[in-house]
Image (tube, rainbow, N blue to C red):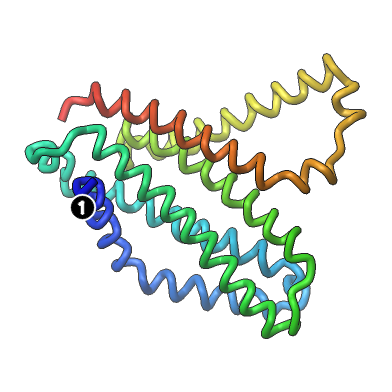
Amino acid sequence: MNTIKGLLLKDLYVFRNFKNNFIFSIIMFIALITMGSLRNDIFTIGSILFLIFFGMNSISSFSYDENADSDKYLLSLPITRKDIVLAKYLFVFLNSFISILVGILTSFIITILVRGAVQNLGDSLRICFLAFTSVSFLMCSNVPCIYKWGVEKGRMQSVIIPALLVFVLGLFASLLLFLFPQIYLNFDLAYIFKISPYICLVLNILFYVISYSISYKIFLKKSI
């Protein structure tokens, strides 16, 4: 446990280099919500903006490790490859989780200041969950690519593979609806949106478990 804690602290120290970017994100958020047409989407804007910021911070931690060749140093210590991969995934998850909390809290405060009250809070929170799941999908698709090809060499794959996964899932859904059109007829979007937080929870667990398993197998075979 102390090993994981130490590895997490190592990555969290990287975050200090992005404090100016974080302040810039808040300023951009405030600037965007002053636009009348966007005031009704404060929660959506806030969650996406902060998710992008913290997501980029997660990727940057890989870049720092790659440039410093830290994996070679860490493996010279009583640290296993499993510890390194697990700590990195915990860092990615914590970044995404903190970002959604910061986005919700900031959006809530600004909504009170702008409107004087929060309207449709349940729907706004569901949108935040959907945004969190989307970013989790992107991050969980990118991390195995980084372990396989590295940050610099894997840039192209980090774009192509998530896009290919989305295409395959879309194609599968289209084929399913074509073969079983009654599914579409009985599809209640309102109900699906209502239970979306539970669906998002299951999807996030699947994303992280599958992605971690792939990354660990890649890193286990990687020559360092």
Picture quadrant where residue 215 is located: top left
What residue appears at the point 24 percent right and 21 percent down from the top-left corner? 221
Residue 60 location, x and y as percent? 34, 53
* Residue 79 vertical position relative to residue 165 in the rendered view, above or below: below
Front-most of residues 33 and 116: 116
What residue appears at the point 77 percent right and 48 percent down from the top-left corner? 194
Q: Residue furthest top?
A: 179
What residue appears at the point 82 percent right and 43 percent down from the top-left corner? 191
* Residue 101 vertical position relative to residue 143 in the rendered view, above or below: below
* Residue 14 vertical position relative to residue 180 in the rendered view, above or below: below
Front-most of residues 61 and 198: 198
Q: Quadrant of the C terminus?
A: top left
Residue 53 location, x and y as percent? 47, 60
* Residue 117 vertical position relative to residue 224 in the rendered view, above or below: below
Badge 1 element: helix
**Given the image, on which type of amino acid does mark 1 rest?**
Gly
Residue 35 location, x and y as percent? 71, 77
Front-most of residues 150 and 114: 114
Q: Is residue 136 shown left or right of residue 72?
A: right
Front-most of residues 86 and 41: 86
Residue annotated with mark 1: 6
